[in-house]
Amino acid sequence: MIDGGRDEETASRGDDDPPEEATPATGNASPRRPYAAPNARPGAASSGRVDTASNGRADAVSSRRPDGASVGRAGRDPRRRRALLEAADRIILREGPEASMAAIASEAGISKPILYRHFGDKSGLYQALAERHTRALMDNVRAAFLRPGDIRTRSRAAIDTYLAAIAANRHLYRFLVHRASAEDTATHSAMGTVIRGLGGEIADILLREGLLPDPVRVHIWSHATVGMVQAAGEWWLDHPDVPRETVTDGIVDLLLDGLPEATRR
């Protein structure tokens, strides 16, 4: 699945990543010893690599942070992982949803094999981007719905928050919702789980506040609302001439007043 070969990886590594433990070479070449983190105990194996802290870059870390927390897949530093995701964000926002893995790696200053090694494979990168952005968006929508005010004011705030976010990041939205979800079933499933979870949370809020007493109807309404807002947002991205306020008001009218009220406007 990882292409480019070891020669490309070695040539592109520079100081970006610590060397992997290699199989001892045949012939007269000396086998590489496993890489030891700078804080390794005395006697631990070392690759002889110069500490990268001297040039301000320290990607090579042990498999656990000083506080005991894991640093993530394959012992990678979470700060480095975040920097790679930020590079992916930049290239997708600049080049659109068809941005290639090679372009993302180039933006990060590494090769594709190293990019994949941080996330396991392309699916891992897709899922990391989905987690990074989908949950942040859902958190913002949830916070807007929990603001003080009546149900119309809060619904309007939540819907407007969602529409504003996808409009500001339309390339990234289309990358995750269309390309990544189409190419990778795990990403599609992960995003669907988060969105369905938001529907359940809205239902819980409405039940807790006593706005709708029937639990079955509350869940139907909440999940239908999430789906309707998502579908209306998709339509709106293809019709940017329509003001966001018009879309927001139209959805709120339909949700809270029903179709008869909406047709009178």
Image (cartoon, rainbow, N blue to C red):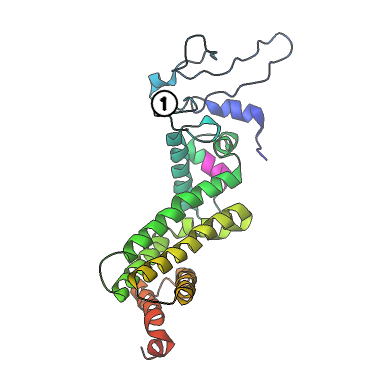
Q: Left of 20 or right of it: where is 209?
A: left
Q: Is residue 89 above or below residue 218?
A: above
Residue beneath the point at 36% across and 58% down: 140
190 up-or-down from 14: above or below:
below
| 48 left or right, relative to 1 | left
Q: From the top left corner, tell me how far across and down residue 149 is, in percent.
A: 25, 71
Apparent side of residue 25 relative to residue 171 in the rendered image (left or right): right
Q: How many marks?
A: 1
Q: Which residue: 58% across, 57% down?
A: 189
| Residue that lies at the very extreme toward the left in this rendered image | 148
Residue positioned 40% across, 77% down in the render:
213
Q: Is residue 101 magenta?
A: yes
Asked which secondary structure carries label 1, the reply is loop
Structural crowding at the residue carrying mark 1, measured as other residues with C-alpha within 10 Å and reported as few (<14), some (14–19) or many (≥20): few
Q: Position of residue 209 (x, y in %)?
A: 33, 70
Task: Please name the residue that numbered disc 1 is placed on.
Answer: 57
Residue drawn at (31%, 74%), measured in percent from left and top? 151
The answer to which quarter of the image holds residue 192 is: bottom right
Position in image of residue 196 (x %, y %): 50, 63
Q: Nearer the viewer, residue 236 or 124?
A: 124
Quadrant including the C terminus: bottom left
Q: Nearer the viewer, residue 93 or 146?
A: 146
Q: Is residue 65 above or below residue 230?
A: above
Report x, y in % for residue 117.
Answer: 58, 35
Q: In the image, which residues are magenta?
A: 100-105
Q: Quadrant of residue 161?
A: bottom left
Q: Is residue 22 magenta?
A: no
Q: Amino acid at mark 1?
A: Arg
**Residue 121 vertical placement versus 245 (above, below):** above
What secondary structure do most residues of the magenta stretch adopt?
A: helix
Q: If the image is split into quadrants, where does the N terminus sit?
A: top right
